Image (spheres, rainbow, N blue to C red):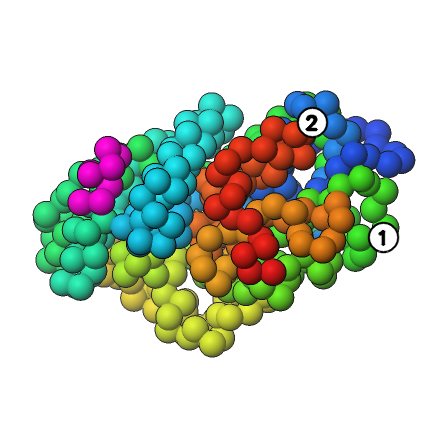
Amino acid sequence: MADSFWLEEPAEPLRARVSEGGVDVAVVGGGVTGLACALTLSEGGKRVRVYEARTIASGASGRSGGFALRGGAMPYHRARAMLGAEQAAALWRLTERTLDRMEKLAGDALRRVGSLRLAVDAAERADLEAEHEALRDDGFAVEWVDKPAGRLADRYPGALLHPRDGALQPARWIRRLAAAAADAGAAICEHERVDSLDELEAEKVVVATDGYPSGLGALDEVVRPMRGQVMATEPLGERLYERPHYARRGLDYWQQLPDGRLVVGGRRDVDLAGESTSVEGTTPEIQTALEALIGELVGAQPAITHRWSGIFGLSPDDLPLVGPVPGQDGLWVARGYSGHGNVLGLACGELVAKAILGRREPELDLFDPARLA
Ligand SMILES: Cc1cc2nc3c(=O)[nH]c(=O)nc-3n(C[C@H](O)[C@H](O)[C@H](O)COP(=O)(O)OP(=O)(O)OC[C@H]3O[C@@H](n4cnc5c(N)ncnc54)[C@H](O)[C@@H]3O)c2cc1C
């Protein structure tokens, strides 16, 4: 009950690699970011070792709501106001390309069923209208839904359909990514926590721990940990939701799985102070609020089979910190996705790897840690 539903799926053992001596790059963190980075570096001919304190996917990457969304943590029209039209479009295009790449790597762990972002009131509807207009003006695929179907019609006055988003079985996806990295030559060491950079025999170190404090001085003071709680129900008798749904600016989210279960998360605003922590665990306040949400979404109270939580990293400006850490030679970082790291994590892990391989891409400028460090 206390662990992620996703992680319960049996895992194939990872290909064992003899790994001794120094490496070109040590990667700290065995989630989407670290493994994406390891895969690209290994394909580029670098000797790579991944260190994961627990097991592959045991961090946020195996505990999330499983939404694979394009874009950043902020809506598109805000990104345009913040970054300018050209840079915002570049960020959205990067994540659309990354979703296509994820589809190739993830196989049946990703379903491209789209996502539905719902407005809970008139203010949120106005916000969605502004985002819809901005996306359409810039040529991105998006559909306005005036009246969501079924039980939602009276609760949510408007929604945006993002047709090319997807739904993940996140643990299956991350384990596949780990297998691909191992096949490309990366050594993956589970149950190996790194306590000091001095213990690593590596030319470069990439810290990819998102909201989990690394203890390695890799901008731990800039990225604020936040807990998210999630639950899964027994399979429901009917199909209610065809794609991932999220409302209240992402504070409520749910998806129905192919076997009929509903996975529901969020409601951290019930106790924001209590959820501002790097300690995993569930609390009665949030769990009760999530059960109430399930009641509203289903019209009945199905049995809860799994309850879990995970930690994600908030960045002060909602953009991740990705690149070399200022003033620390050889230390790189990719973290701080502000709750939106499933696709961005893949993109940013790859951006860091390419930069280390000497193939720096212009999108990296968007995330330069120097802006906040
Ligand atoms: C409840 C929840 C729901 C979410 N839902 C979504 C969603 O639906 N869509 C979305 O896009 N994003 C979502 N997110 C955010 C997303 O899951 C994360 O941003 C993303 O998975 C981060 O991946 P990562 O590889 O950077 O970090 P993680 O997957 O968190 O991996 C970091 C790893 O580093 C390890 N580690 C930490 N310190 C050390 C050390 N010193 N030595 C060795 N290992 C160490 C940890 O054990 C951990 O496994 C959610 C997050 C949570 C918690």
Res. 30 visible in picture? yes
Q: How busy is the neighbourhood of tag 1: few (under 14 within 10 Å), some, or many (20 plus)?
A: few
Does residue 220 sit above or below 233 in this rendering?
Answer: below
Res. 245 visible in picture? no
In the picture, measured across the screen, residue 55 lies left or right of residue 111, that is right
Part of the protein shown in magenta:
133-141
| Label 1 SS | helix
- Rendered location of residue 178, percent (x, y): 63, 33
Q: Earlier in the sequence, mark 2 or mark 1?
A: 2
In the picture, measured across the screen, residue 219 lies left or right of residue 148, that is right
Q: How many marks?
A: 2
In the picture, measured across the screen, residue 291 lies left or right of residue 17, that is left
Say what amino acid the circle numbered 2 marks.
Answer: Ser
Residue carrying label 2: 42
- Indicate which disc residue 198 carries: 1
Q: How busy is the neighbourhood of tag 2: few (under 14 within 10 Å), some, or many (20 plus)?
A: many
- Rendered location of residue 63, percent (x, y): 51, 50
* Image-quadrant location for residue 37: top right
Residue 130 or 17: which is nearer the viewer?
A: 130
| Label 2 SS | helix
Does residue 304 sit above or below 188 in this rendering?
Answer: below
Residue displayed at 54% across by 65% down: 224
Residue 133 or 208: which is nearer the viewer?
A: 133
Residue 140 magenta-highlighted: yes
- Rendered location of residue 15, percent (x, y): 72, 27
